[in-house]
Image (cartoon, rainbow, N blue to C red):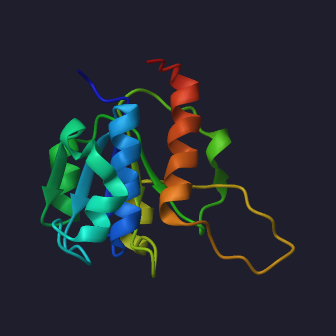
Amino acid sequence: MTPPLHIVLYQPEIPPNTGNIARLCACTGCQLHLVHPLGFSLDEKQLQRAGLDYWEYLEVKEYPDWQSVRDGLGENRNWYALSTKATTLTWEVEFRVADVLVLGPESRGLPGFIRRQISPIKLAMRSDLPVRSLNLSSACSAVVYEALRQINITK
């Protein structure tokens, strides 16, 4: 079965965020891809706890570096970088089945070379306060459900 979306976490640092996103992928049928180095072990208790007993319902693919995930998923799909530095809002995007959503490390976001290779998008946030970003797993969830709404995936 083709996953509705591919979720790529580039060098994630916080185990509960990755666990929550793994659980999101299990619940939505999205494919999870992890790009090393990771800031934790996949055996870490916080990671496993956040993902609950959903780990058996998803396949997690791991890659040693950025180019490996690019080669593995291929160029024949839309790639989106979720970034606070983007100017395009998520609801300005027309998502399609098998698109790729890339999220960066929590402490620094995606590096510029990745944002330049793929389409950067962002979630709308208020501008009257100096808020930087949403939690990584919350942001991922918001974009995944907007994409699923657009491509009309129902379970």
Quadrant of the image occupied by residue 50: bottom left
Q: Position of residue 131 (x, y in %)?
A: 72, 76
Q: Say which residue appears at 50% left-offset and 41% top-offset.
A: 144
**On the rendered structure, is 66 left or right of 154?**
left
Which quarter of the rendered picture does the C terminus lie within? Answer: top left
Q: Where does residue 118 sit, x and y in percent of width and height? A: 41, 54
Viewer-closest of 138 and 128: 138
Asked if one can make out residue 114 in the rendered structure from this viewpoint, the answer is no
Q: Is residue 131 left or right of residue 116?
A: right
User: Can you say whether 10 is above or below 4 in the image?
Assistant: below
Residue 75, given in percent of the width and then of the height, sits at 27, 41
Residue 65 lies, in percent from the top left, at: 17, 66
Most distant residue in the right direction: 128
Q: Which residue sits at x=65%, y=55%?
A: 123
25 or 103: which is nearer to us?
A: 25
Q: Is residue 69 left or right of residue 25?
A: left
- Is 58 above or below relative to 116? above
All told, the count of numbered labels is: 0
- Answer above or below: position of 54 versus 110: above
Residue 98 location, quadrant: top left
Q: Residue at x 37, y 29 (%)?
A: 4
Up-down relation of residue 12 to residue 19 (above or below): below
- Residue drawn at x 19%, y 48% is 60
Q: Is residue 111 visible?
A: yes
Q: Quadrant of the N terminus?
A: top left
